[in-house]
Amino acid sequence: MDTKALDAIALSVRSLSMDGVQAANSGHPGLPLGCAELGAALYGEILNINPAKSDWIDRDRFILSAGHGSMFVYSLLHLAGFDLPYEELKKFRQLGSKTPGHPEYRWTDGVETTTGPLGAGFSNAVGMAVAETVLAAKFNTNQHKIVDHYTYALSGDGCMMEGLTSEAASLAGHLGLGKLIVFYDSNKITIEGSTDIAFTEDVGKRYEAYNWQVLKGDMYDYAGILKAVEQAKAETGKPTLIILKSVIGKGSPNKAGSHDVHGAPLGPDEIKATRKALGLDENEAFYIAPEAKAHFDKRRVQWAEDYDAWNVTFKAWAKENPALKTEWDQWMADKVDLSGVEWPSYASGDSLATRSASGKALQAIAKAVTNLYGGSADLAPSNNTALPHGDYSKADRAGRTFHFGVREHAMGGVVNGLVLHGGLRVFCATFLVFADYMRPAIRLASIMKLPATYIFTHDSFYVGEDGPTHQPVETIASLRIIPGLTVLRPADAQETSFAWKWAMEKTDGPVVLALTRQNLTVFDKPADWEASAKKGAYIAKDSDGAPETVVLASGSEVNLAIDACEKSSKKVRVVSVISLETFKQQDAAFIESLIPSGARVVVAEAGVKDGWEGFASGDDAILCMRSFGESGPYKELARHFGFVPEHLASLF
C-alpha cells in the first residue's frame, strides 16, 4: 500500500469536490471532504473494476447511497479513468453535464445506480448482492468461477435513519449476504445540525441484531480500512457494516465538523483558507496531484490484467460448458425470447380473476425464461406469484422465488438492484393499495428505465370486506402520472397474458399489472385485437352500425360495460383501455378510429376519474369513484357505488 499515493488521491478528491460545488454555487461538499481517504482506499486499492470495460459483469459494484455527495464519486471516476472528462467536473450541476446534482445511472460512466433519496442506494446494493449469489449459483462450476465479486456501498447518518434502509438491512442479514460490505460515514451531522437532536441509537447494535457483522474504524486510517475489508470478506455468512468515525468537511478550517458544510458551498474565502490548510495554491482550482495520476496509471494496468485473466477463465468455462454458455448468453441479452412460452389458453365464457390468470401466465413464462426471478411482500398466495423452482434463501441461492417479507419499500429497492446488476428479469408483487409504500422505488425505476415488473392485485373496491384502507381507488391514477411507467389493467384472462407479453418485451421502463381479486368473464375479441391493444386500447364489443355511444373502460369495468349494452337500446361500442397513458399518446387518427366524432363518450373505471375527463362527454358521463370505498361484500358495494349494468346503461 502506497500511503503517499493514497494521500495524493484524497487531496485531489477534496480539491475537485469543493471546487466543483463552489463553481456550481450549489451542492454538498461535506461528504467528499470528509470521506476522501475512504475513496482513495476504495478506488486506489480495494475495488476490482475495469474503467475501460465499465459494464464488465464480474466487476465489484460501488454505490454511493448518500448520493448528495456526488462530487465524491465523480472525482474518483475521473481519476480512475472512466469516461468522465476533466472538463465535466467543472460543469457540476449544469444542464447537460455528465456531473448532475445526484449520480444518475445510464448518464455518467461508472455510476451503478441513481441515488439521492436516502436509503435507495443501500437497498439497491442489497439487490445487487443477491444477484451476484444467483448468478454464481447458476453458472460457477467446480473448475471455474466466472461470477465472484463484491458489492460496496457508502451510507451516511441520513441513510441510517431512513426506514427503507432498516427494511433492506433486515432482509440482507436474514439472507446472509456475505459479499455485501457497507461503509457508514458516521460524522453525526445532518442538515439541521448534530444528529443528537433526533438520532441517538446505537446503530452497530441494531445491525448486529439484523445478523450483520459490525466493525468499527477511523475514516482516515488506510490500514484500518483495508483490514476491515479483509475481515468483511472473511465473514462469508453475514453482510458487514464498517462504521467509520469521520469529520464532515475535513480540511475546511472554519466549517469542518459543522452542518454548515453539509449542503452549501464553502464560499470563496473558505475555499482559499481550505486550499491553504491542505497545502495547495490558494488560487489553483480543480487540482489533481501528479502522484494520484501516476497511481491510477498503474491501477489501470493491473485492472486490465485482471480483466484479461478473467476472460481467459471465462473462455475456458465456456468451452467446457457449452449448454451453460448458451444459457448465459440468453440471460445477458437485452431482449427476452418468449418463443418457447406455452401460453395458457382460454375460451369465451371462461371466468377467473386476472390475478389467477397472471399466475398461470407467470408459470408459463418462468418455465421458458429461466432468468425470471421474483417474489412477493408476504402475499404470494394472494398474488399468485410463487414459482415452482424453489425458494431463494441463505441455504439455497438457486431458488427463484424471493420472500421479501412485509417490506414493500425495500422490495422495490432490492428489485431495482437486481435488475441493475444485470442478468436477471425480475418481478415483485403486493396489493395495489400498498404500491404507495413502494412509490419512491417505482419512481426511481422509471427514471432509470429499468425493466422491472410490478404485480399489483386486489385493484379496486371489489376487495370488499377489507374496507377503504385496502381499496385503492386513487392508486391507479397516481401511478399513471409517473413518466415512463406503463400501467396495464387487463379486462380478462386473455388480456392478462397479453399484458405479461408487454411487460416481458419492454426493455426501457417498468410495467405495472393491476389485477382483480374477483372473477371476470373472458369475452370474444376481434382477430387483430392485440395490434390495437398495443397502442393502449381496442374495440372489445362493437355496435351494429356507427356507434351513438362509446364506453371507455378498463379492467373489470369492461365486463360491466359489455353487460350494460344488453340494457340499452342505443348503438354502443365498448373500448377496452388496457393502458390509458399509452392510449393518450396515440395520434388523432387512431383515437378517432375508436372514438368517432359525434358519439357520446362514457367512462367506466372503479377508481377516481382523474385522467379520464378529457375523453368523457361531461361529468354525467363518468362512472368512477367519488369517495373512498366501504366495507362489505363486493357485490353489495358494486350496487352501492352504481357499478351495475343498469346504472351504467343509464349514462349512455
Image (cartoon, rainbow, N blue to C red):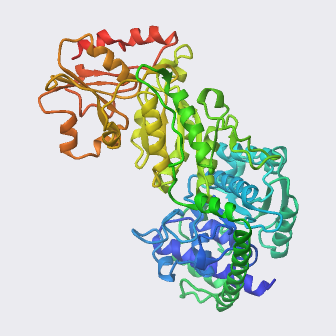
Residue 497: x, y in percent? 47, 36
Q: Is residue 215 visible?
A: yes
Residue 376: x, y in percent? 64, 36
Residue at image location 39% in from the left, 42% down from the top: 481
Residue 262: x, y in percent? 60, 62
Residue at image location 63% in from the left, 53% down from the top: 418
> Is 526 left, or right, of 250 in this rendering?
left
Total marks placed = 0
> Is 650 left, or right, of 88 in this rendering?
left
**104 or 354: nearer the viewer:** 354
Residue at image location 52% in from the left, 59% down from the top: 334
Residue 490: x, y in percent? 42, 32
**260 or 237: nearer the viewer:** 237
Q: Is residue 188 visible?
A: no
The quarter of the displayed image where residue 392 is located? top right
Q: Assign the N terminus to one quadrant of the image.
A: bottom right
Q: Is residue 71 above or below residue 331?
A: below
**612 or 206: nearer the viewer:** 612
Q: Is residue 326 above or below residue 514?
A: below
Q: Assign the C terminus to one quadrant of the image.
A: top left
The quarter of the displayed image where residue 531 is located? top left
Q: Residue furthest left?
A: 598
> Is 309 left, or right, of 164 in this rendering?
right
Q: Is residue 10 above or below residue 136?
A: below
